[in-house]
Image (cartoon, coloured by chain):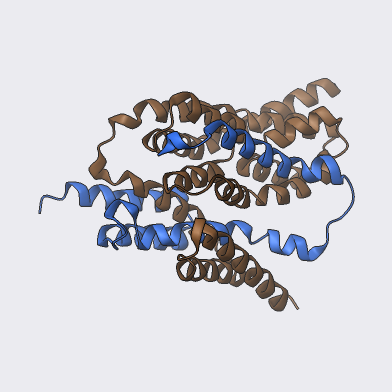
Amino acid sequence: MMGDYPIWLIIFGLGAGSFGLRFLFLGLVGDRAMPEWVLRHLRYTAVAVLPALVAPLVLWPSATGGQPDPTRLIAAAAAFIVGYVTKSIYGAMGTGAAVMIGAAYWPF
Amino acid sequence: MARAQVMSSFWRGVRDGIPFLMVIAPFGTLFGVIATEAGLNVFETLGFSVVVIAGAAQFTAIQLMSENTPVVVVLVSALAVNLRMAMYSASITPHLGPLPLWKRAFVAYFLVDQTYAGAALEYEKRPDMGLAEKFSYFMGIAMPICPPWYVFTLLGAYVGEAIPAELGLDFALPIAFIAMIAPALRTGAHRAAALTATLAALGCAWLPWNLGLIVAALAGMVVGAEVERRTQR
């Protein structure tokens, strides 16, 4: 599947685009201020894009042929709850991983 | 004296960056594992981490490529994940904007979540820092963060094949993102943005080429910005 992709085009395209975003203001805008409404939308980019990416993967994982999987749902919910309550990225990752590993090696 | 101050700023940056190894090591290794599992060779995997140097965007690209998404959608989606870098760039410009162009280019290349967070907090805490000190602090903090990103990616690419399939490694990425998002939902506006984006992504999953991701992200951003505007009045 990956063989069909122009991998290096994607790598350098992403590299150029990412550098462009990082250089945008530092390099080109300088001291001029940005409109407040632009900044306000940019502030929510990360918390919007990442959940949108994750939600279908949690509900319809490709590893199970798109069928909802109790283990993955529980792992996702546990990771979210621990992350939300404790504000700890590692705690959340560890909890999610523990559920997945536990389910894989549970003897019953 | 001035030179000594610049050097001590560099080493203070290195010291402040070291705790971030705790994030870089697992995420870098994970990227190496996922990229090679998806079919990239070691050189391509390392190329991603050196050229793109943005964890979330790299993970997004790999995920979409393993779903056979068209190239344009892979690029647009991964760059959408990276839009926050423009925010970082805007926010750090008042501090590092007066540097010569080639130094600003270095700063831009190394501007990632951790270097931005560390440097921005330091500049706020020490407003009397000079331009040279600010630059060396930034380069200092980048040292324990960016080169280890390459090294751990490589490590993950080599150990990846040793990890058994029944562990459900396909789910490591969703778990990693959930772990990053959940602690970031600090305000009602953040929660509204995330909830809107989640529901919209599920509702728009039927759209071709993963365009549902873009639609859902835009919907989440609009709702987040609107909630912030209303709650701050």
Give the chain coloured brown. Answer: B
Residue B223 lies in what quarter of the image? bottom right
Residue at the image position 48 percent from the left and 35 percent from the top: B28
Taking A30 as reference, is B229 above or below it?
A: below
Residue at the image position 68 percent from the left and 43 percent from the top: B116
B73 left or right, relative to A35: left
Residue A52: x and y in percent read 51, 61
Residue A92: x and y in percent read 41, 53
Residue at the image position 40 percent from the left and 63 percent from the top: A81
Residue B169 lies in what quarter of the image? top left
Give the chain coloured blue. Answer: A
Q: Is residue B88 visible?
A: yes
Taking B225 as reference, is B29 above or below it?
A: above
Taking B59 as reference, is B154 above or below it?
A: above
Quadrant location of the C terminus of chain B in the rendered image: bottom right
Quadrant location of the N terminus of chain B in the rendered image: top right
Residue at the image position 82 percent from the left and 37 percent from the top: B129
Q: Nearer the viewer, residue B220 or B69?
A: B69
B12 left or right, relative to B67: right
Q: How many numbered marks does the figure carry?
A: 0
Q: Is residue B127 visible?
A: no
A32 left or right, relative to A107: right
